[in-house]
Image: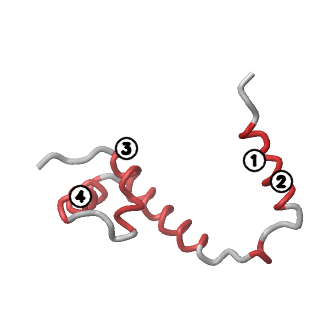
């Protein structure tokens, strides 16, 4: 069996946690994670972020959130130049 690389773990973590990965992908993913301390740490952090993100409510956002997001969107939409 070909073991996946750390970059593959990063690319597949959402599919794994959302239950969208096939059996072979899950086997390779968890086989790699069992052997790689950095990927175990990454997986734990990703799980925690996903857990916390589901708990954010509009009341948790800072008062200027809309203003900041509008600024960011305008910056992204600016033509290169």
Q: Earlier in the sequence, mark 1 or mark 4?
A: 4
The residue that disc 2 covers is 68
Q: Earlier in the sequence, mark 4 or mark 2?
A: 4
Distance of mark 4 from mark 2, alpha carbons?
A: 39 Å
Left or right: 15 as drawn, with respect to 78: left
Q: Residue at x 33, y 71 (%)?
A: 19
Q: Earlier in the sequence, mark 1 or mark 2?
A: 2
Say if mark 4 contacts mark 2, CB within 8 Å: no
Instruction: Tell me the SS state at disc 2.
Output: helix
Label 1 vs label 3, nearer the camera: 1
Say if mark 1 contacts mark 4, CB within 8 Å: no
Label at residue 25: 4
Mark 2 neighbour density, 10 Å: few (under 14) some (14–19) many (20 or more): few
Q: Earlier in the sequence, mark 1 or mark 3?
A: 3
Mark 3 neighbour density, 10 Å: few (under 14) some (14–19) many (20 or more): few
| Image location (x, y in percent) of residue 74 | 79, 43
Instruction: Please tell me in which quadrant of the rendered image residue 24 appears.
Output: bottom left
| Image location (x, y in percent) of residue 77 | 73, 39
| Image location (x, y in percent) of residue 41 | 44, 58
Distance of mark 3 from mark 4, alpha carbons?
A: 14 Å
Q: Residue at x 39, y 50 (%)?
A: 11
Label 3 vs label 2, nearer the camera: 2
């Amino acid at each position: 069996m070909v073991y996946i690389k750390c970059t593959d773990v990063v690319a597949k973590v959402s599919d794994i946690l959302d239950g969208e990965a096939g059996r072979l992908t899950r086997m390779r993913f968890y086989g790699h994670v069992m052997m790689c301390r950095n990927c175990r740490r990454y997986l734990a952090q990703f799980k925690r972020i996903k857990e916390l993100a589901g708990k954010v409510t509009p009341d948790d956002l800072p008062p200027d959130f809309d203003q900041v997001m509008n600024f960011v969107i305008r910056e992204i939409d600016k033509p290169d130049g």
